[in-house]
Amino acid sequence: MKTAAPTTPRWPALPRPRQIVVVLIISVLIAWVTTPVFQSPFWLVLRRTTFISMVMLLAFTVSGTWRLLWLPRWIPHWLVRVAAVCLLAPFASLAAYVAIAGSFMNFIKANNLLSGFATSTIFALFFGPLVAVAAIKREDKQRERADRLQLELEKNALEREVLDARLRLLQAQIEPHFLFNTLANVQALVEAGSENAAPVLRHLIAYLRAAMPRLNDAEATLENEMQLVSAYLEIMHMRMPDRLQFELRLAPELKSLRFPAMAMLTLVENAVRHGIDPSTEGGRIEVGGKQDANNMVTLWVADTGIGMAETAVPGTGLTNVKARLQACFGKDARVDLHEQTPHGLRVELIFHPGAKV
């Protein structure tokens, strides 16, 4: 990705309105302090001081542009700007006193103007660099703050891109796993010569038509997920009507909650495959969700199948669900496993929907 080359201003930078206001305020203060020294009317000292200050402000802003355009990088920017202010101070003071005298020759002949010029120059060389250094420090702080903000924005954008890539990778692991397992169920019915094979296949085709567009849906909700879970369990119920019963119980306020697509479906599929299928008696699956007073959400898939063996370890599907849950709701999101009485397994997803990732 190509980045645009930095552009340089065609004309020297002019003072900003805020800088002009600040310099006017400083000019009033300096004129008020130095009026007794010059023994002149306040308004005359103020006019002279304001003129000198504005010339030095122009030198300050223009020298900042020169630093960017022409001068070598090894020269400190603050030195260039302070030097420009000091260099222009005597000339600005001279111009102010020549204007008062009417001509340069009149200025040379007036001893009181010469002494005033020298005093004004000294004051300008004293106050000018001080104000310039203070302004440079403030600009540096503002620049550092802006750079930190930009870095933070870039960091957040990069973290979001990494998170999106991670979610896509995890989603890619789920899709083929789910699809092949579902097709294997249909194959088992066909090979057994079951009369339910054709109806199940028709329901499966309709289900996949509805489900496939949602596999990569970043805006999937719990309501979408429960619709897919219901369709899947209907198919499994047709396959083993005497051995599988199910119930869905989702709190209405959770229907619009954003949720990783196929996460609950993975847990339901595991419950059928590892809990109900191996059991000679079959069993019941309950899928639900609720939110407590602290806004913590608990989703669960509970079955009355054979349960989990003591030596069993969480498989790829369960690990994937946990990773996607934490990628979506933060590292505090968790997946808990609980043994059911007298047998079976309850898997709970616990997270805060407003947690920062």
Image (cartoon, helix red, strand yellow):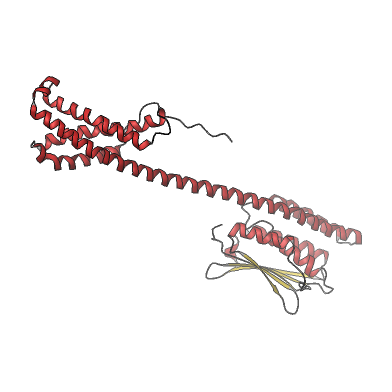
Side (left or right) of 162 relative to 19: right
Foreground pick, 221 / 199? 221
- Image quarter where the C terminus lies is bottom right
Q: Position of residue 34 (x, y in %)?
A: 14, 40
Residue 309, compared with residue 21, is above or below; it is below
**Nearer-the-camera pick, 54 or 66:** 66
The N terminus, quarter of image:
top right
Residue 350 percent location from the top left of the image: 61, 67
In the foreground, 13 or 166: 13
Look at 45% across and 47% down and name the residue there. 148
> Is residue 230 something that shows in the picture?
no
Q: Residue at x 18, y 43 (%)?
A: 29
Tell me if residue 112 can be seen: yes
Q: Quadrant of residue 49?
A: top left
Pick the residue in front: 282 or 120: 120
Q: From the viewer's perspective, is 42 left or right of 357?
A: left
In this view, 21 is above or below 253: above
Residue lying at the far front of the rendered structure = 74
The image quarter in which residue 106 lies: top left
Q: Is residue 231 left or right of residue 107?
A: right
* Relative image position of residue 143 (x, y in whole percent): 40, 43
The total number of labels drawn is 0
What percent of the width, then of the height, locates residue 43? 12, 36
| Residue most extreme to the bottom | 342
